[in-house]
Image: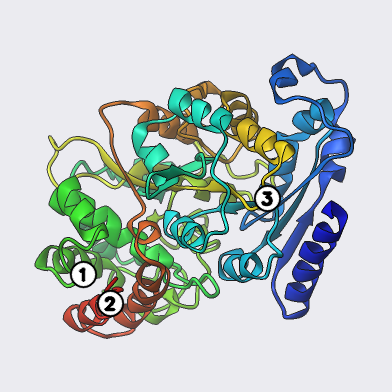
Amino acid sequence: MRNARHRRWTASIVAAAALGLTLSACTGDIAEEEAGDVDCADYESYGTFDGAEVTVAGTILDLEADNLNKSWADFETCTGIDVEYQGSSEFEAQIAVLAEGGNAPDVGIVPQPGLLNRLAGGGWLIPASQAVEDNVDEFWSEDWKTYGTVDGTFYAAPLMASIKGYVWYSPAEFEEKGYEIPKTLDELTTLSETIAAEGDHKPWCVGLESGEATGWPGTDWVEDYMLRLNGPDAYDQWVAHEIPFNDPQVAAAFDAVGGYLKNEDMVNGGIGDVSTQVSEAFQTAGLPILDGECSLHHQASFYETFWNPEGGDDVKVASDGDVFGFLLPPANADDPLSVTGGGEFPVAFRDAEEVEAFRAYLSSDTWANNRVSLGGVISANKGVDPQNASSELLTQSIEILQDPETTFRFDGSDLMPGAVGTDSFWKGIVAWVGGEDTAQVLDTIEGTWPTS
């Protein structure tokens, strides 16, 4: 039955590829080639399995997918479990269809709690084992556990994490021109206006294009401003729809962001006019900073990977390097540190010991340190040594997530119902940047919120 089920899942992926989906097939071959001699002491608790296989799918592609395979190479060697990963840019759109047809992978790496809720509501998910839950209770905060819980049932541990509110810049340009890192949102506005007035280039470069998910980088802007302008309580009320999407507080956040994204004087540095934000891929939008064609780019900590997309080190990410990042500042200099962020959750569609052994490993401090050491990512796992991170910025990011004084809020659109968070909110950003006014866009999004 296992082999027949694997063939059905693989056939579904192949059929998806025939429809034009972008796939990255990263099998255990990479792991096997690079495993070498392994000390299996850290893996004894997971057991040993003869010829077992676990299929995994998610949105992680290319270099990051290669590193994902490397991160569990020793686990494969020591347990005998072959982990087969398939990455697809259409995973989010396809996973519910595959689950409904009985063709889902054993494990799906879900990037949105809202999608996790939908899959749990469909009755397709296997609750997490006690080993997974024990790891989460030891290594993660209660908030993170809540994101993997639906109606009191715990389904998935967190995996990687990101901080969404970084502003990327060139340290050399800041030093040459005497720019200072802004300490408040007003100071950020003043800095942007100063750069615009100098006339060398537009201060901000922005890319909102992401295939079917086009618009999501704009939702990150709004969420950051919603948290900083209105505080965590209002943010939580907005996400839970305890205040409507067209509430004045939400409008204020949109309008503050609009001072940049809808302003021809502010965007789109090195790329074109305001309209080019919608056609410029988020992966490449920050690169004009390297050519001196813009000064500022708002994107998450994971954007570090895109400065060296081939995995090299030509672009140095450091406070004294080619590019670095500062956190979007608070509204007031004495406000507590508040950040938005995201993460992934490995959910299970098959109830089997090897699947839960694999998920227990992914929830451990061993896996988190292994993956962080490979570079380009962070984790909110409290067992991670921040010094294992691949850059100064990522070390700082881990320390921020581990700091009990940090106010952390998960990406709002990822928590909202899919009809809003991954549909009307994304589309609303595109329409808004395209010229629709704030009230019209917010009324439209509010009208899509499910009534039950």
Q: Nearer the viewer, residue 310 or 246?
A: 246
Q: Nearer the viewer, residue 259 or 271?
A: 259
Q: Earlier in the sequence, mark 3 or mark 1?
A: 1
Percent coordinates x, y for residue 80 in the rendering: 84, 32
Residue drawn at x 75%, y 67% is 13
Percent coordinates x, y for residue 361 in the rendering: 64, 31
Residue at which label 1 appears:
245
Picture quarter with the N terminus: bottom right
Q: Nearer the viewer, residue 413 or 271?
A: 413
Residue at which label 2 appears:
445
Percent coordinates x, y for residue 104 in the rendering: 68, 61
Graded by Cα atoms within 10 Å as few (under 14), some (14 to 19) or many (20 or more), the crowding at tag 1 reads many
C-alpha separation, residue under disc 1 versus residue under disc 2? 7 Å
Above or below, 281 against 440 in this view is above
Percent coordinates x, y for residue 388 in the rendering: 57, 24
Q: Earlier in the sequence, mark 1 or mark 2?
A: 1
Q: Disc 1 vs disc 2: Cβ atoms closer than 8 Å?
A: yes
Left or right relative to 212: residue 172: left
Q: Nearer the viewer, mark 3 or mark 1?
A: 3
Residue drawn at x 81%, y 25% is 78
Residue 430 found in image quarter? bottom left
Residue at which label 3 appears:
350
Above or below, 420 against 193 in this view is below
Q: Amino acid at mark 3?
A: Arg
Element at badge 2? helix
Graded by Cα atoms within 10 Å as few (under 14), some (14 to 19) or many (20 or more), the crowding at tag 2 reads many
Left or right relative to 58: residue 384: left
Element at badge 1? loop
C-alpha separation, residue under disc 3 versus residue under disc 2? 36 Å
